[in-house]
Amino acid sequence: MNFYGTTDFDDALAHSTAPGLIRDATREYVGGTKEQQPERWYASSPLHHVRPGLPATLSMHGQDDRLIPPSQLHLLDAALAKAGVPHRSVELPWASHLFDLTRGNLATQIAGGVIEQFEQQQAR
């Protein structure tokens, strides 16, 4: 499962409303800037590892996520589709980053139902 995940660091930096925060977190995670660590930068973006044969993937992202842009969901969705990986991508209206930390809100209720349905489909 992928909840509001960064799938491509370049796109995340280009479309985030908090690029400084994303840049700093990415630099710390990768161990340097893109220029300093180009191989690590590339290898750390999950989008570059999508290939046929991966397990079914469920992705959810809030439409109102101001930290990790919803474009990350769209990029992963397209890559999984192109690779023929079974997947489902859900963009949750009004949900922001870390929406699932607040139990009982609308996004969490929708997510719970989507997860249950996805797991049942994959169990068949």
Image (cartoon, helix red, strand yellow):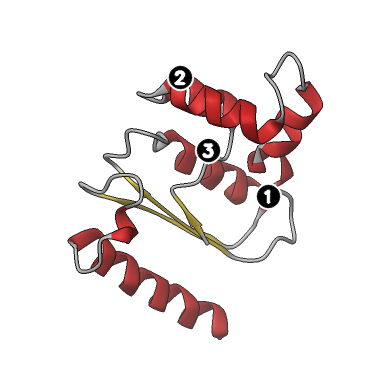
> Pointer 1: what residue?
83
Location of residue 56 by image quarter: bottom right
Q: Position of residue 121 (x, y in %)?
A: 49, 79
> Pointer 2: what residue?
20
Q: Verify CB contact (< 8 Å) between mark 1 and mark 3.
A: no
Front residue (pair 80, 109): 109
Location of residue 10 by image quarter: top right
Furthest toward the top, the residue is 35
Location of residue 28 by image quarter: top right
Residue type, numbered disc 2: Gly
Q: Which quadrant holds the C terminus?
A: bottom right
Q: Residue at x 50, y 46 (%)?
A: 5
Is 62 left, or right, of 6 in this rendering?
A: left
Circle 2 SS class: helix
In terms of sequence position, does the residue under pointer 3 or pointer 2 come before the other? 2
Is 37 left, or right, of 97 in this rendering?
A: right
Q: Position of residue 105 (x, y in %)?
A: 19, 62
